[in-house]
Image: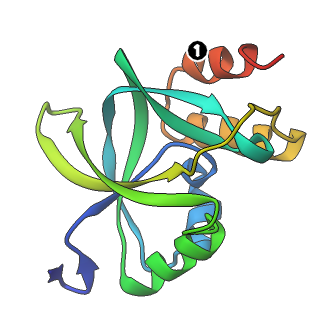
Amino acid sequence: MKEQGFLKLAYAAYGSNLHLKQMEVRCPGAECIGKGYLEDYQLVFGKRGFLDVVPCQGKRVQVGLFKVTDTDLQALDEYEEYPELYDRITVSIQTESKEQVQAFVYKMNPYDSMEKPTETYWTTINEGYDNFSFDKKDLEDALSKID
């Protein structure tokens, strides 16, 4: 199940955990291993203005991939308020080199309305996107869908 202390599944980050300095503090044992796409999903701002991924045929979400330890997983679970706010699901990620890797993502539990992110959260996500040189169009589209 583990390789040199890392969990078998990679962690696919799509929100504030793309912020590399924040991840270093939260998950000091984590190792960034690249980036990829979660196919047939899109970004939305869900409960409390936090990002979520929802199924959407033909769309894809940019993700940062990390190897994480058990201790990192515990820290991520606490930060993501697992299992109350987010669930952890296993997905297939297409890497930049077109390989398919199994990873886990945090998927928000059902909610009734989308909410705007706080300015701090929005800034953190944008800096994370900069860390990975991601296109921000999908992020801006998610924000524009909130009433």
The total of numbered circles placed on residues is 1
7 lies above or below 33: below
14 lies above or below 68: above
For the point 18% across and 82% down, the residue is: 2
For the point 71% across and 36% down, the residue is: 112
129 lies above or below 15: above
**In the figure, is residue 35 to the left or right of 42?**
left
Q: Position of residue 38 (x, y in %)?
A: 33, 34
Q: Position of residue 131 (x, y in %)?
A: 55, 42
Would you name the residue on which mark 1 appears? Answer: 137
Residue 69 visible at all: yes
Q: Nearer the viewer, residue 92 or 26?
A: 92
- Quadrant of the rendering where the N terminus is positioned: bottom left
Q: Nearer the viewer, residue 104 or 2?
A: 104
Q: Amino acid at mark 1?
A: Lys
- Quadrant of the rendering where the C terminus is positioned: top right
**In the figure, is residue 20 to the left or right of 1?**
right
Residue 127 visible at all: no
| Residue at the farthest right position | 119
